[in-house]
Image (spheres, grey):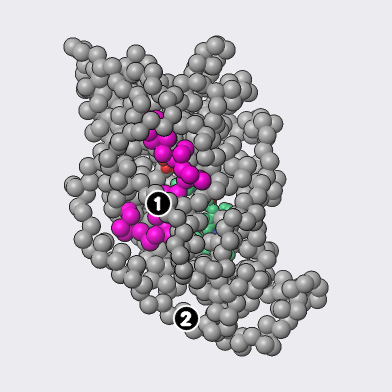
Amino acid sequence: MLSTRVASRSAKYALKNIACINGANRFLRTKASPSAQGKLSESRVRFNKTTKASLLTGASSLTLFLSYFLFDNDKDGVSVKEVKKHNRIDDCWIVIDNEVYDITKFLTIHPGGVARLMEFAGNDATEKFHQMHSSATLEKMKEHLVYIGKLKGAFENELTEEEISILQHKATIPPLRKIFCLSDFEAVAKQVLPKSTFFYYATGSSDEYTLRENHYAYSRVFFRPKILQDINEVDTSTKFMGAKVDLPIYITAFAGSRLAHPLGELNLQAASYDANVMQMVPKQNSYSFEEFFSNVPDDQNQWMQYHFDTQEELDNLDSWVEKSSALPSAKGLFFNVDLADIGNREKDSRQRASQPGSEYLNEMTDNQFGSHPKITWSTIERIIKNTHLPVALKGVQRGEDVVIAAEKGVSAVILSNHGGRQLDFSRPPLEVLVEAKQMLREKDLDGKIEIYLDGGVRRGSDILKALCLGATGVGMGRPFLYAMSGYGEEGVTHLFNILRTEIENNMRLLGVDKIEDLNESLVDARSLSLKNPRINDALYDQAYEPMQFPEFK
Ligand code: HEM
Ligand SMILES: Cc1cc2nc3c(=O)[nH]c(=O)nc-3n(C[C@H](O)[C@H](O)[C@H](O)COP(=O)(O)O)c2cc1C
């Protein structure tokens, strides 16, 4: 087993180096990778065809027609000066990989919202685009964009004050040996990430009650350790839907890993492979499906996360299920059930609104939100029939739904409120766990379904409390983004080491040496359902970034 891991790892390193060079290139705002360029020149041919077709009909035909004559768009391409002129919500161009696109019509249908695109109106979005999306996303959405031409020249971007500060902080970053707990990673991330990225990660929805309560709920559960136990070496391994893993945690799915580090999801993949920790692979991966899985050894443990941004994706669900079920590393398919709309991620919006040049943004408009394709229990039943893999739901928020899921043959649920990013005032998953276990017992369904949870988990003790109350495993999101921001893959490995140490140490002190021996008798959860008592958690509270009121002009 070890030798296979080592062998696949060295193959992976070769691929990672390529990815690193591509990532770094993008970081330095130079060229796209050869494969991306290949794909783009292919798409360029298609865009040109679209362009010709739309010259004959349609509202945009006049603009396009004029573009050939009026815009500074000769055979060598479109000038930077010209691109800069199209910086309005009703006339918006952006540049990706030296290609200029008119995205005016796409603005209102962008699943990530208008505001994020308008930040790059009349500008080069290459770096940010590749940090959020794979080249496949561009391909998928090409019918909604209008291709204008090749960029002539380059945008000259001087280092901003923020970029200089980030470079200075990176040069003096604390060594990993000084990182004692997960909140330390967050404090470092605040200094080495652009504000726009930190706020994208850290934001919850609306007033962030759920975001904070997710974490504070753990402070309302205390341990009841057993004494004088004849315990052996602590074993932290367990099984997640039949797959053996060495820690009772998983890296949950999240967008935007490459905003933290040029290698993004590959850091998570490599570190979790070495530690034999479950990685949930996000649908919104900054690598395409093919790019990413060409790096994954067959003996890795992964879960696949999927949600539907467009009706077309829902219509093509079966092909995704088939493609994912065929992956040797895939041990389960997880579908979001918490995305009927995008939550009001206000802290992030406020940050954008505080930036110079944000006058054209109005974040509290309908086109930032809007309903998503509808999935129902029958969609889930259809998926269960079409795959040999366990099917699970991510984002369950009440006991009754866990009962229905168990009755319908769903293998697992993740109790989650999306890290407090969706409906503010949905309850902390730890509390829902207790409710769900009770309801399953009443219906004689306990043991028919595995329960996982995520949100606000920051300590080994949090993990043990959840396991004592009946969770099979616990997911974490932001801590991995913060660890990668400062330290890349090494940070992720260090994070695993911290949690492993905390879990082992706490288990010894609890008088338990095996995960399966953790049970309700080891905790006092009587205060769990109390809401919002004043709790002081010094490091968590210091790292927490409160929302700010608008400033005067
Ligand atoms: C023409 C360029 C772009 C296209 C075609 C595009 C397309 C998409 C698509 C299809 C999604 C849904 C998820 C997916 O399938 O990957 C999405 C989500 C998103 N996009 Fe873009 N995008 C573009 C540019 C950008 C840029 C420049 C940003 C800047 C940060 C951005 C930020 C986001 C965010 C934050 C989400 C939502 C992630 C979440 O759920 O939190 N996109 N975009
Ligand atoms: C920046 C960010 C992006 C996220 N993107 C996704 C996503 O694309 N799909 C998804 O199912 N969950 C997503 N989540 C939610 C996480 O999977 C998870 O539910 C949450 O992060 C857990 O809370 P924690 O960050 O406190 O650990 C995202 C979370 C964050 C912070």
CB contact under 8 Å: marks 2 and 1 = no
**Viewer-nearest residue: 223 or 362:** 362
Residues rendered magenta in the picture: 189-218
Quarter holding residue 52: bottom right
In the image, residue 110 above or below residue 446: below
Residue 279 seen by the camera = no
Label 1 crowd bin: few (<14), some (14–19), many (20+), radius 10 Å = many
The one nearer the camera, 141 or 111, is 111
> What separation in Å lies between label 2 and label 1 (alpha carbons)?
30 Å
Which amino acid is tagged 2?
Ala
Residue 200 among magenta residues: yes
Tell me residue 43's x, y (percent).
62, 68
Classified by dominant secondary structure, the portion drawn in magenta counts as: helix
Pointer 2 or 1: first along the chain? 2
Which disc, if any, is residue 266?
1
Question: Can residue 210 be seen in the rendering of this structure?
Answer: yes
Q: Is residue 265 left or right of residue 537?
A: right
What residue appears at the point 58 percent right and 61 percent down from the top-left corner? 362
Secondary element at tag 1: helix
Q: Nearer the viewer, mark 2 or mark 1?
A: 2
Amino acid type at image mark 1: Leu
Find residue 43 and name its label.
Answer: none
Residue labelled with disc 2: 154
Residue 289 in picture, x, y percent from top left: 52, 51
Q: Is residue 92 left or right of residue 223?
A: right
Tag 2 secondary structure:
loop
Q: Nearer the viewer, residue 54 or 424?
A: 424
- Give the x, y percent position of residue 71: 64, 85
At horizontal 39% and vertical 60% (from top left) the residue drawn is 195
At 41% from the left and 65% from the top, the residue drawn is 22
Q: Is residue 502 magenta?
A: no
